Every structure is written in structure tokens, then in C-alpha cells.
Amino acid sequence: MQAVNGPGFESERKWMVQTQLIPRGISDKLVLDAFRKVPRHMFVPDAFADSAHNDYPLPIGGGQTISQPYMVALMTECLGLKGGEKVLEIGTGSGYQMAILAEIAGEVYSVERLQELADAAGRHLEALGYKNCFIKVGDGTLGWEEKAPYDGIVVTAGAPKIPPSLVRQLKEGGRLVIPVDCGFGQVLTIVERHGPSFKTNEVCGCVFVPLIGKEGWPENSS
């Protein structure tokens, strides 16, 4: 655990876990404990603080959203983290997913396309005392090669296909969790590396903003 217990809304966080996560199959203790601790309301605009723990995404500016709690939990659980790993996040957004990851992983790196979101997320994470979070602004579809390889990579935007650069940056046995376009929506997909080969598993349908970049959608898709 990296941060002090989030101030305020403790009962709302417990309610979120008990009513939205556990009944829908989230069972990883590390994930559930992180959700009970990280103050989700601090990662949304003040006007939405009272709605922060409800079961839907919320706008955070720049045409981006903070994902619903269940989807953040599902994607985190799909990484299969045990504690202490090195993780890459593509799409820092509000910083909430990064805080959840930082409660479990040893180091969390994140690439954000929009400077204003990266700056805001960095301020929130610093205020909460996280020392294992590192953010840069850039093209997330290309990953963060200088810090590779990673035990896990999570992408918080929908891709037209699995970006080759991200796959190359996985460690042996590492997992990439990413929403991928399937022609009539998006499918949350797990890519697991085994030597030169990769195992792919489709989890469920999902809806995310487009992943913009060289190995994603073009700029005008946003």
C-alpha cells in the first residue's frame, strides 16, 4: 500500500465494492482492497464528487472520461497482479486507474496524450502520497520503451487493433489488457506473452473513447 487512506467518502467506497464489484465477480483481494482505499471522488471534477462512486463513467475534460468502477476493477483483475510488478498504463486520464494499480504494483508508468490531463493526474497522485507513479506525455500506442519490459500493460482507450509496440514491451508471461474494435463495438481483450507466441482471450464487450496514435486511430477519431 502506497498512499494514506483516502479522506472522506469511506462509506461510499465500501458501498461501491459491496454493490458493484463483488456481486459482479470481482474477487481479487488486492483489487478490492485498493478500491476500498483509493479516494475516487478526488479524481473527478468537484461538480461530480457526489456521483463518483456510482456505476457509470464521468467526464473529466478534454473529451475524456473516468471509467465506471466495475470496468476499472475488471481490467485491473485481468492483469493478474500479485504485488510488486512493473506496470504500464496507456491513457492516464484522471489518474484513478493509476492509483489503483499503484496500490498493488511496485512501479506504475503511464503515457497520456493530453498535457492538461497528465498535469492534473500528477497533482492528484502527488497529493495522495504516491511515490511509485511516473507519467509522461506522448503517443501511448508506442508505449514507453525506455522502461520496458513490463509485467502488465493496461490500455484505457479502444484500439482498432492490438498495437505491436505494446506487445513487444511485455515480459515473458506478461499480460496486455486492451479494448479492441470488433466491427460492431469493442471487446476487452487479454494478450498474454509466451516466448515468441501470444495467447489472446476475449473477456466481454465494452465502450471506451478511441485510442489515438500512430498504432491506433487517427486524430480525427476523437
Image (cartoon, helix red, strand yellow):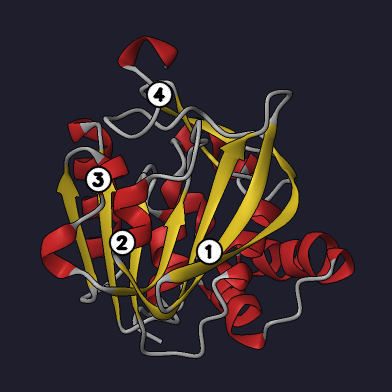
Tell me, for residue 217, which label it has, or none: 4
Residue shown at 54%/72% (left/top)? Answer: 79
On the rendered structure, is 3 left or right of 41?
A: left
Residue shown at 40%/65% (left/top)? Answer: 99
Q: Amino acid at mark 4?
A: Trp
Q: Secondary structure at mark 2?
A: helix
Q: Amino acid at mark 2?
A: Arg
Marks 1, 3: nearer the viewer: 3
Above or below, 72 relative to 83: above
- Distance from disc 2 to disc 1, alpha carbons, whole Å, reads 41 Å
Tell me, for residue 168, which label it has, or none: 2
For the question of whether residue 187 can be seen, the reply is yes
Residue shown at 31%/61% (left/top)? Answer: 168
Q: Are marks 2 and 3 in contact (CB under 8 Å)?
A: no
Q: Amino acid at mark 3?
A: Leu
Marks 2, 3: nearer the viewer: 2
Dot placed on the residue nearer the N-terminal end, 3 or 4:
3
Percent position (x, y) of residue 156? 48, 46
Q: Amino acid at mark 1?
A: Gly
Tell me, for residue 142, which label it has, or none: 3
Can you tell which quarter of the image residue 5 is in? bottom left
Q: Residue furthest front?
A: 196
Name the residue carrying label 1. Answer: 8
